[in-house]
Amino acid sequence: MTQVTNPERLSLDAVSVEDLNAALRVIRRLPLELLGFLILLPIVCIGLSRLGTALAPPYGVYLYGQSLVTWGLILMLALLFGLVWWRGRQVGRLLNAPEILSSPVPGLLSAPGVLAERAQALGMEWTGFFGPLRPRRT
């Protein structure tokens, strides 16, 4: 028995406009999330420093030779890497791009180019970083 395949379904460029817009939303939201981490980082460091000093004055709490601030920074760095990795995976799935799925963190840098390429294949144009997709003018 032979199985008939649809070549359009197998194409990597077969991405709907809704998926492109969803990927564009994820890419636009990422700088705001990174800004949130940048704002949250000193708050976490100051809070853990004061907590460690309050629990064991005058030097603070040390776990495995490191202060609570160091452990908080390690945790924040792991969360930051996890966020960028997760957003890269989301964009890779939405754009159906195996190069982004295979390495989500560095692939996230090439996502705007892939997004613009896929939009052009659908007859749409990207109006810039914060702009939406719109039909191309002829």
Image (cartoon, grey):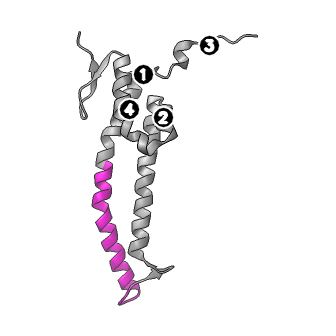
In the foreground, 114 or 68: 114
- The residue lying furthest to the right in this view is 1
Which badge, 4 or 1, comes first in the chain's sequence?
1
Q: Residue at x 41, y 69 (%)?
A: 72
Quickly name the residue at label 3: 5
Real-space CA distance between mark 1 and mark 3, rounded to the nearest whole angstrom = 19 Å
In the image, taking residue 130 as reference, residue 88 lies left or right, namely right
Q: Residue at x 40, y 72 (%)?
A: 70
Real-space CA distance between mark 4 and mark 2, rounded to the nearest whole angstrom = 18 Å
Q: Position of residue 92 (x, y in %)?
A: 46, 35
Quickly name the residue at label 1: 16
Q: Nearer the viewer, mark 1 or mark 3?
A: 3
Real-space CA distance between mark 3 and mark 2, rounded to the nearest whole angstrom = 24 Å
Magenta stretch, residue numbers: 33-59
In the picture shown, does residue 23 fall above or below 13? below
In the picture shown, does residue 51 fall above or below 2? below
- Under mark 1, the amino acid is Ser
Whether residue 75 is visible here, answered yes or no, is yes
Q: Position of residue 50 (x, y in %)?
A: 33, 79
Q: Residue at x 54, y 17 (%)?
A: 9
Which badge, 2 or 1, comes first in the chain's sequence?
1
Q: Nearer the viewer, mark 2 or mark 1?
A: 2
Which badge, 1 or 3, comes first in the chain's sequence?
3
Q: Position of residue 4 (x, y in %)?
A: 65, 10
Local crowd at mark 1 within 10 Å, few (<14), some, or many (≥20)? some
Q: Nearer the viewer, mark 4 or mark 2?
A: 2
Real-space CA distance between mark 2 and mark 1, rounded to the nearest whole angstrom = 19 Å
Which badge, 3 or 2, comes first in the chain's sequence?
3
Element type at mark 3: loop
Disc 1 to disc 3: CB gap under 8 Å:
no
Magenta stretch containing residue 119, yes or no?
Answer: no
Tell me the tag on residue 22. Answer: 4
